[in-house]
Image (tube, grey):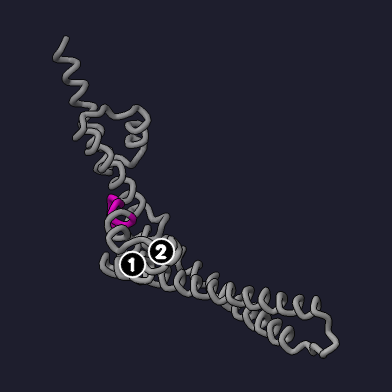
């Protein structure tokens, strides 16, 4: 048995979808966000992206159906050509080749259709997982407009707080740019207070060391 046949047998039993796993979606695409609003916004981005993909796939499917119908007509037309007893051997051979070529073209279109259907199923599955995750986070009632100040404060506070804790955990000094960015947030923010306390502590150590 050649390698292609072995591969076909393997793939008939063992297959992997060309999409993200539910685990990956929940833990790495959404879960990596540092705040609830960040998770909700990321869900919306992913839902929007896949909704647009499904709309484009629907157009591709319609286009493909028309191409399949045209290819079927091409095969029928080629098969219906009148070959009289006086037709030369060369013409008969050419006719047979043309039929095979058009049949292969039709077969390719049917394979493309199957791939398109699989792609659509994968996108639909991912979309359902993102919708489910969005709903588990509270859904529309918990959503906040992107430019709402309290939402932005929650989002950036979460991101900066995570970076601050990671740097502290691994003993890496905070960059000057990160500190300046944190201090640019409103004074009422948690990260502003953390950075201010951090700087006060450093200043106190410097004073005590003199």
The residue at the far left in this view is 208
Write down the region rendered in magenta: 29-37
* Residue at 29% across, 45% down: 157
Magenta span contains residue 30:
yes
Predominant secondary structure, magenta span: loop
Choose top left, top right, bottom left or bottom right for residue 4.
Answer: bottom left
Q: Is residue 6 visible?
A: yes
Foreground pick, 15 / 192: 15
Label 2 crowd (10 A; few <14 / some 14-19 / many >=20):
few
Q: Secondary structure at mark 1?
A: loop
* Residue at 36% across, 51% down: 152
Q: Quadrant of the C terminus?
A: top left
Residue ID for mark 1: 14
Q: Secondary structure at mark 2?
A: helix
Instruction: Relative to 66, say whether 174 is above or below.
Output: above
Instruction: Relative to 151, say whether 16 is above or below.
Output: below
Q: Which mark is residue 144?
A: none
Choose top left, top right, bottom left or bottom right for residue 144.
Answer: bottom left
**In this rendering, position of residue 207 left or right of residue 100:** left
Q: Is residue 141 visible?
A: no
Could you say where residue 75 lies in the image, as x and y percent from the top left? Answer: 68, 83
Q: Quadrant of the N terminus?
A: bottom left
**In this rendering, position of residue 141 left or right of residue 77:** left
Residue ID for mark 2: 7
């Amino acid at each position: 048995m050649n390698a292609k046949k072995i591969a076909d047998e393997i793939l008939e039993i063992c297959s992997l979808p060309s999409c993200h796993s539910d685990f990956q979606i929940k833990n790495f695409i959404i879960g990596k966000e540092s705040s609830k609003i960040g998770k909700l916004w990321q869900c919306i981005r992913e839902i929007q992206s896949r909704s647009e993909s499904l709309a484009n796939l629907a157009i591709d499917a319609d286009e493909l159906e028309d191409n399949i119908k045209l290819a079927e007509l091409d095969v029928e037309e080629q098969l219906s050509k009148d070959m009289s007893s006086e037709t030369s051997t060369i013409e008969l051979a050419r006719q047979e080749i043309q039929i095979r070529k058009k049949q292969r073209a039709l077969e390719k279109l049917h394979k493309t259709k199957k791939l398109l259907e699989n792609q659509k199923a994968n996108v639909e599955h991912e979309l359902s997982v993102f919708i489910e995750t969005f709903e588990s986070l509270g859904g529309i009632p918990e959503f906040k407009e992107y430019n709402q100040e309290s939402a932005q404060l929650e989002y950036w506070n979460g991101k900066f707080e995570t970076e601050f804790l990671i740097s502290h955990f691994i003993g890496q000094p905070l960059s000057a740019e990160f500190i300046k960015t944190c201090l640019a947030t409103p004074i009422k923010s948690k990260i502003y207070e953390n950075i201010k306390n951090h700087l006060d502590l450093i200043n106190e150590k410097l004073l005590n060391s003199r």
